[in-house]
Amino acid sequence: MAFGGKGLTKIDGFAVFIDRTVTGDRVAARIVRKKRNYAEAVVQEMIAPSPLRVEPPCPYSGYCGGCKWQFIDYAQQIVLKQRHVADCLSHIA
């Protein structure tokens, strides 16, 4: 998972950030923005969901923007968020 809650994959070393994915998801995605060093993509089809994926408790999850992580198991959310904080602090210190 990348900072901001997007999944990250690499294709021949080229980083592709995919919105609303989690480690272990297998998806067919469409690139919507390509930059020199990375691309951004959206899911077109969920081929095989990750075991970390859960049904979001909020019916508006994914639409309003306030609950980007609700499709991930809560215990895993905590692990990922702790990792993000540690990464941020290690870059500052």
Image: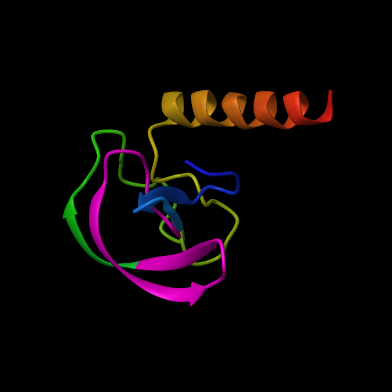
Left or right of residue 10: residue 45: left
Query: In terms of secondary structure, what is the magenta stretch mainly?
Result: strand
Whole-percent x and y of residue 73?
Answer: 38, 33
Identify the residue at the far left of this view. 47
Left or right of residue 22: residue 86: right
Question: Does 20 appear above or below 41?
Answer: above
> Which residue is found at the position 43% from the left and 27% from the top?
76
> Which residue is found at the position 34% from the left and 53% from the top?
12
The magenta stretch spans which residues?
17-42
Question: Could you tell me how many numbered marks the image carries?
Answer: 0
Question: Does 11 appear above or below 63?
Answer: above
Is residue 29 in the magenta section?
Answer: yes
Whole-percent x and y of residue 28?
Answer: 23, 64
Left or right of residue 89: residue 49: left
Q: Quadrant of residue 81?
A: top right
Q: Nearer the viewer, residue 72 or 93?
A: 93
Identify the residue at the far front of this view. 12
Q: Nearer the viewer, residue 69 or 38?
A: 38
Is residue 27 in the magenta section?
Answer: yes
Whole-percent x and y of residue 21?
Answer: 37, 51
Q: Nearer the viewer, residue 59 or 41?
A: 41
> Which residue is found at the position 52% from the left and 61% from the top?
38
Task: Say which quadrant the C terminus sits in.
Answer: top right
> Which residue is found at the position 43% from the left and 48% from the top?
8
- Colour mapping: rainbow
Whole-percent x and y of residue 47?
Answer: 15, 56
